[in-house]
Image: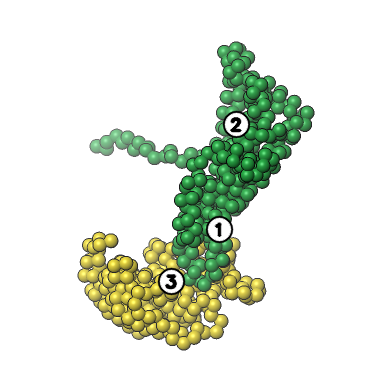
Chain colours: A yellow, B green
Amino acid sequence: MQLSLVGVAHAYGDADVLTDITLDIPGGRILCIVGPSGCGKSTLLRLIGGLERPTRGQILQMGRAPEGCLNPLTYVFQDFALLPWRSVAGNVRLVLEDHGLPGAEARRIVTDVLARTRLSDFADALPRQLSGGMKQRVAIARALAVNPAVMLMDEPLSALDSQTRELLMDDLVALWTRAPFTSVYVTHNLAEAVRLGHRIVVLSRRPGRIAEMVDIDIPLAERTADHPDLARQQQHLWSIMRDEARAADSELVDG
Amino acid sequence: MAEQGTPVPFRGGGFAPRAKRGVGVVVFIALIALVEWGTRSGWISSLTLPRPSDVLATFGELWSSGRLWEHLAPSLTRFAVGSLFGVCAGIGVGFAIGLFSYARAGLVPLVAALFPIPKIALLPLFVIWFGIDEASKYALIAFGTFTPTVVATYGAVDNVDRTLIRMGQSFGLSWWSIVRKIVLPGAMPGILSGLRISLAIAIILLVAAEMLGAQRGIGAYILEAGSLYDLERLFAGVTILSLLGVAVSFAIGAIEKRLLRWRN
C-alpha cells in the first residue's frame, strides 16, 4: 500500500503550520521527514495517519491494505504511550482486543512480536520497571502486532539517550531487513535520518514546505555510523537546514 | 603546603516524609493518657472532659448489652446505601462531564451551584420529598457524596494522559474500549482520592441525618447523650464515628493498593 499527499496544508487558527505538501510515500521503504523544531513535521505525521484533518489538500491511500493487516496506519510515539497499568504483553494485547481474534491467535501474535523485539522474558513486567529503550521496543512490538501497512514513527528515539538510540536503530534496521515495511519516520536528528531513510524530506521552518528531497541508495544493513557517504549526506542536509533552524530558533513560540 | 580541608556542609535531605510505624498509635495513647491523668488528678474537671477509662467502660457496656449493634447496624446501612447511590451517580455524571462537551457545559455550573449548599440545611426538604423514614436519610447522604465525587471524577478524567487516548484512537480502538481500558483506569487514582473526601462527608451527614428524626443510629445515640449531658456516652459515640472514619480510610487504602499496583 502506498500513500499520496496532494497539496496538503494545515493551519491552527490563523497560524499556518504546513503549506503545499505534495509527496508520495512508496511501499516497502522508509521515508524520513526532517526539519527544524516547530516546522510541523509531527503535525504532518498526524495528518498522514488520520489523527487530524488537513485544512486543505488530500491524503490518499493507493491500493488496499494487505491481507491480515489489522490497522493499516500505525503509530510509534515519541513518549511510548504505553498503558502503565498493563504488563508488556497486556499492552500488546490491547491493540488486538477489538478485532475479535480467537484467543489462541492473539496469544500467538503477542508471543511472536515479543520474540521479534527480544522482549519474551519481560512479558509480565510493568512499564515502570522498564528502561526507556525497552519501553520503546514494547511500543514497536505493539505496532508490529497489528501488521501495519505503514508505520508512522514520531521521533521514536528522541526520548532516549544516545547509546540506547544506537541500539534501537540497529534493531529497526534488523526488523526492516527481515521484513521490509513502509514507514514514515519523523525526526530532528539527521544522523538517524541518514541511517534509516531511503528517502529524506527536508521541511523548511514554519509554515513547513518541502525544501529538499534526498534519496540514499546504500542498503540499510551497510550503513554504519562512520560511513563516508552518509557523513557527506548528513553534512549536506545540515547545510540546507542550518539557516532555517537558526531562524526558527529565534522565533517566538506563539508569534 | 596542603591546606587543611573542611568537609562540604550537607544541605540536602528532608522534604520526603516517610511512613514511621507506630508513631500514630503513640500519639493517640499519649493524648489519652494525658487526659486520663488530668481527670484523675483533678486539673481537668469532669465537666470539661470525661475520664477515658469511663468512656471505655461505657463502650464495653454498650457492647455487652448488644445496644451497640442496635445503633451501629442502621447507621452502617444508611452510610452504605446513601454513599453507594451518591458515589455511583457522581462517577457517572463525572464521566459524562469529562467526556461530552454538552454535559460539561450544562452540568459544571450546576455542580458548582450545588456544591457549596450545606446539605444539612436541606434535610427538612428531603423529609417532605422522601418521607421521615430511611429514604430521606439515604437521599441526604447520597446528595452529599454526589457533588464531591463528580468534581473529583471529572478532574481525574481531564487528567488522563491525552497521548494514551490518541494512541488508542490510532490503533482503531472503539470509543467504548478507550473509555473502559484507558480513561477509566487512568482516572482511577483521582476517583479514589476523591472517594476519601466523599465518604468522610458521608459520615458527617449520616450523623446530621440521624440527629433529625431517628430513633436508632450513632447520631441519635450521640444526640441523646448530649441532651442529657452524659459525656461518657457522647464520647463513646464520637469514638465510634472516628473508628468508622479510620476503617473507611483503611478500606480505600486497601483498594488503592490493589487497583493502583502499577504506580510506583
Q: Chain of mark 1?
A: B
Element at label 2? helix
Residue of label 2: B25
Please say if A52 is above or below B68. Answer: below
* Marks 1 & 2 on one chain: yes
Q: Can you give x and y, in whole percent of width and height, for residue A49 in the image?
A: 43, 75
Q: Nearer the viewer, residue A88 or A223?
A: A88
* Cα gap from disc 2 to disc 3, whole angstroms: 55 Å
Q: Which mark is residue B184?
A: 1
User: For mark 3, what is the residue?
Assistant: A51
Say whether residue B10 is left or right of residue B35: left
C-alpha distance separating marks 3 and 1: 22 Å
Residue found at x 56% / y 51%: B90
Residue plotted at (68% across, 29% down): B221
B207 and B199: which one is in front? B207
Work out which residue is located at the far front of the displayed protein and give it.
Answer: B128
* Disc number placed over residue B170 in the picture, else none: none
- Residue at left offset 44%, top offset 83%: A61
Please indicate, yes or no, whether residue A102 appears anywhere in the rendered image: yes
- Is circle 2 on the same chain as circle 3? no
- Residue B135 placed where, x, y %? 67, 44
Q: Residues within 10 Å of mark 1 (few under 14, many from 20)?
A: some
Q: Amino acid at mark 3?
A: Leu
Q: Circle 3 — which element?
A: loop
> Marks 2 and 3: which is nearer the front?
3
Which amino acid does the dot numbered 2 rest on? Val
